Amino acid sequence: MPRLIMLTLGPLDDDPRARRAARTAAASGIRVSAIEGAPQSRREARATLASAGFREIRGLVRLLRLSRRTAQILRAARGTSADIVHAHDFDTLPAAWLLARRHSARLVYDAHELYSGFDRDPPRLWRSLLLRIEGAICREAAAVVTVSEPIARALHERYRLPRRPFVVLNCPPLEEVSVGARHGAVRAIYQAAAGPGRNLADLPDAPGVEVFARVLGAEAPPAGVTSLPPVGLDELVAAAAEFDIGLVIDRPETENARLALPNKLFEYLMAGLAVAVPNAPAMAELVRREEVGIVYEPGELGEALSRVAADRPALDETRRRARAAAVERYNAEAQRPALHEAWGL
């Protein structure tokens, strides 16, 4: 039975992508052990925020944090053995590289983001080091995995990789959901964790649409938006299924945001929701190709939602297409072959 060590920034159960990979590995007959990094402390967060006006100091803070996390993971890995080391996120990559060398194991790097394009104005020292470290280890890794075709293309070209990274979309497992015609007010939901580029003030006042928000770790939504309590990761699809439209409000202000395909997009599709996404290339291309929702420009989400709500039969048909796409293509089960190949199975 192959042995796989999975490295994560924080608790495995808090990372939906890593958790899906671990479940896939276990179901494939791989013995999985997780080494979980400690989440960023409040003190670290305050230090980073306090240095926001000093770009290069922020870079040094990140470098120190990377060094500490690498040392922490290596200490936690003492006495382990592995045939495969799977690194989730850049901050686990140096430790994964060292562990793979120690065990003569297969190194798999799972880039959840395009880290070199994550910031609008990155510290120059930090970005230079990130490019050097990530590029060198990616070229040496047995496999690189990422979340979208555009990010795979960017990594392949930026680092001159010997082969194109595998794409494993952020899709939930197949789940039973009833999608039928509905009556009454159209209901839209924004369901996510708080994060960069996600401003709840962007949630619109849309005549003819009731707007709800279920956000973990965020401030109260604007007036006119109903706040809902968070639910567990395994409940997100079922919780969304009672709504009609799933909202994505990630501002496409960075290269990473423009090229990413987030978890919530695929959760909405699995729940049988039409989706509303910003005009970011990766999301817009998928939504238009599959005809599963609308693409909006900044400041126009409310008006776009009202137009959709005005034609309930067309909205219900879009919901059915969204559910069909999820069942046929955009589910965790359909992503397994790429993971198997990355692991060398």
Image (cartoon, grey):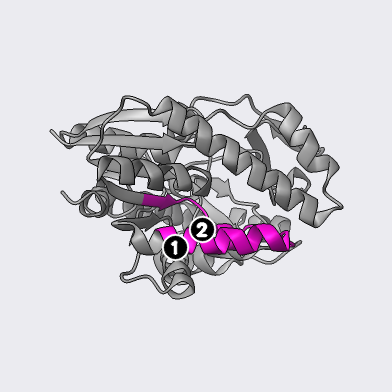
Left or right? Give the position of 85 relative to 191. left
The answer to whether residue 43 is above or below residue 65 is above
Which region shows up in magenta?
A: 109-137
How crowded pointer 1 is (Cα within 10 Å; few <14, some 14-19, many 20+) is rated as: some
Residue that numbered label 2 is attached to: 133
Amino acid type shown at disc 1:
Ala
Label placed on residue 136: 1
Left or right, 97 with respect to 250, comes to: left
Q: CA distance from mark 2 to mark 1?
A: 5 Å
Element type where label 1 sits in the image: helix
Viewer-side residue, 294 vs 277: 277
Q: Are marks 2 and 1 in contact (CB under 8 Å)?
A: yes
The reply, left or right, for residue 107 in relation to residue 152 is left
Residue 282 in percent (x, y) is at 50, 66
Tell me which amino acid carries mark 2. Answer: Ile
Image coordinates for residue 162, horizontal then vertical, percent: 32, 71
The crowd level at tag 2 (other Cα within 10 Å; few <14, some 14-19, many 20+) is some
- Viewer-proximal residue, 200 or 189? 200
| Residue under the point 54% across and 69% down | 281
Image spot of residue 179 (x, y percent): 38, 42
Residue pictured at 22% horizontal, 40% vertical: 83
Specify whether residue 319 is painted magenta. Answer: no
Residue 209 at least partly seen = no
Residue 239 vertical position relative to residue 185 in the rendered view, above or below: above
The answer to which of 148 and 187 lies nearer the viewer is 148
Above or below, 28 relative to 124: above
Identify which residue is drawn at 68% across, 28% down. Answer: 41
